[in-house]
Image (tube, rainbow, N blue to C red):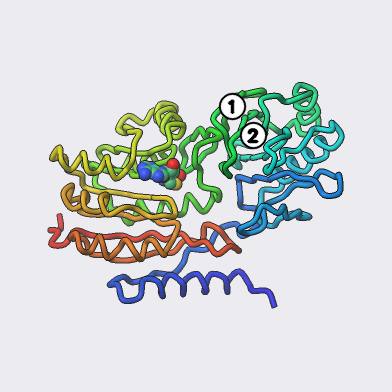
């Protein structure tokens, strides 16, 4: 028997509760996603052959076998339809499909990003060869079928690993990025930058994180692992200044542009490792009032946490996309003078096993006011 959406939420809530058991944290009720279907604004597909016919879909778990599907309940439907058109065009244009084992062939992956609020659509065609035979006609045929596409990028990935994008990109149509609206601000998103995949739920996630940060107008805030600057810019009007730190240079470039486009003047962005930045700031004697961190699934590092103790923010808001690493990191924060107050699970990825959680930690002995 299939589960109801409500049942999946209960399971996620229990998972977080179990993982954080033994820690002095109260786990608040999970925030359901406004959309539980077709919420994924980023869709990618791999390509292959089955008996001479072009197929596309996701890879099966821990394998490179392509799982074709008749339609996915999680993916944006326009994006899925564009990917299907590309599959048919590849067949009719006799565009060769990249063979991972032999490292030859052209069409490798397609990535489609959609911006719900602006209607913009970016298509990234990843090829495994420096040449794209018949490119002009292929792109024209794609645009004829899908005039709703606002930009197309051809990315060359001749690497042997499983990274989706290679280092070289050519914008063949439109601007090469899309702009979406989040929390009333415009964000430009390049193909290489991270962007949350469930827009409506991201607004709830950020609002909750910012509410829990209890910002004051003079607060100096760090937005660590900031991506294109979304969280930092969303809280910039409620605090004194924000410093965003992010490793991916494409995302930092987007973040700087985003601050300009929204005329947000009290944010700055640093490109580098978040842990190293924290250590540097700590050794320069700088102080911050609030640290917001949103690391990848691997969580943060002991160096980052140790540096927090020296920077001594009153509050730390940990936005986690993996409750296992959150459960690992909370005790380290406790060792360095922070007490976890509450944890709020947020259902960012309905019908999958992934769980997002916001955990607020307060400095021990913090004086109120
Ligand atoms: N807060 C952003 C991005 C979260 S995803 C948002 O909500 O959209 C995590 C981000 O951490 C990614 O942009 C990734 O590029 C970045 N990242 C990964 N490792 C990092 C590191 N060691 N130092 C700084 N940023 C890192």
Q: Is residue 231 visible?
A: no
**Quadrant containing ligand 1:** top left
* Mark 1–mark 2 CB contact (< 8 Å): yes
- Which quadrant of the figure contains the N terminus? bottom right
Secondary structure type for disc 1: strand
Whole-percent x, y for residue 28 in the image: 39, 69
Dot 1: few (<14), some (14–19), or many (≥20) neighbours within 10 Å? some
- Which quadrant of the figure contains the C terminus? bottom left
Q: Is residue 278 left or right of residue 93?
A: left
- Residue sitting at x 22%, y 64%: 334
Residue on which the image places disc 1: 169
Secondary structure type for disc 2: strand
Whole-percent x, y for residue 351 in the image: 60, 64
Name the quadrant containing residue 359.
Answer: bottom left
Name the quadrant containing residue 100.
Answer: top right
Who comes first in sequence, dot 1 or dot 2? Answer: 2
Residue nearest the observer in this picture, 262 or 221:
221
Residue nearest the observer in this picture, 29 or 140:
140
Q: Is residue 252 left or right of residue 213?
A: right
Whole-percent x, y for residue 182 in the image: 49, 42
Circle nearer the viewer, 1 or 2: 1
Residue on which the image places disc 2: 124
Distance Cα–Cα, label 1 vs label 2: 9 Å
- Residue sitting at x 33%, y 44%: 224
Q: Is residue 263 depicted above or below 42 in this figure?
A: above
- Residue sitting at x 67%, y 33%: 128
Number of numbered discs on residues: 2
């Amino acid at each position: 028997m299939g589960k109801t959406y409500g049942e999946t939420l209960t399971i996620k809530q229990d998972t977080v509760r179990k993982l954080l058991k033994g820690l002095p944290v109260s786990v608040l009720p999970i925030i359901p996603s406004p959309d539980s279907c077709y919420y994924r604004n980023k869709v990618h597909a791999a390509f292959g052959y089955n008996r001479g016919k072009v197929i596309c879909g996701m890879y099966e778990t821990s394998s490179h076998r392509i799982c074709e599907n008749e339609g996915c309940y999680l993916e944006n439907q326009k994006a899925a339809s564009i990917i299907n058109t590309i599959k048919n065009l590849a067949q009719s244009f006799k565009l060769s499909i990249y063979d991972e084992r032999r490292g030859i062939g052209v069409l490798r992956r397609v990535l489609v990003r959609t911006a719900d609020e602006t209607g913009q659509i970016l298509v990234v065609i990843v090829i495994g060869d420096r040449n794209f035979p018949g490119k002009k006609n292929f792109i024209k045929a794609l645009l004829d079928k899908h005039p709703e596409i606002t930009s197309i990028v051809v990315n060359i990935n001749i690497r042997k690993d499983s990274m989706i994008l290679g280092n070289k990109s050519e914008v063949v149509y439109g601007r090469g990025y899309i702009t979406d609206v989040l929390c009333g601000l415009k964000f430009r998103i390049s193909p290489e930058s991270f962007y949350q995949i469930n827009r409506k739920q991201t607004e709830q996630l950020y609002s909750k994180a910012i509410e829990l940060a209890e910002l004051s107008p003079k607060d100096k805030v760090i937005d660590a692992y900031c991506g294109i600057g979304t969280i930092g810019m969303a809280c910039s009007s409620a605090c004194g200044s924000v410093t965003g730190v992010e490793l991916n240079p494409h995302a930092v470039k987007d973040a700087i542009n985003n601050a300009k486009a929204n005329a947000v003047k009290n944010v700055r962005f640093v490109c580098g490792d978040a842990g190293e930045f924290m250590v540097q700031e700590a050794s320069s004697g700088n102080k911050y009032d609030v640290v917001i961190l949103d690391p990848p699934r691997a969580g943060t590092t002991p160096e980052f946490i140790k540096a927090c103790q020296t920077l001594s923010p009153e509050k730390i808001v940990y936005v986690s996309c993996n409750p296992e690493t959150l459960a690992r990191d909370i005790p380290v924060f406790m060792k360095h003078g922070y007490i976890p107050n509450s944890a709020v699970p947020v259902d960012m990825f309905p019908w999958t096993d992934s769980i997002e959680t916001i955990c607020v930690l307060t400095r021990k002995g913090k004086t109120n006011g």
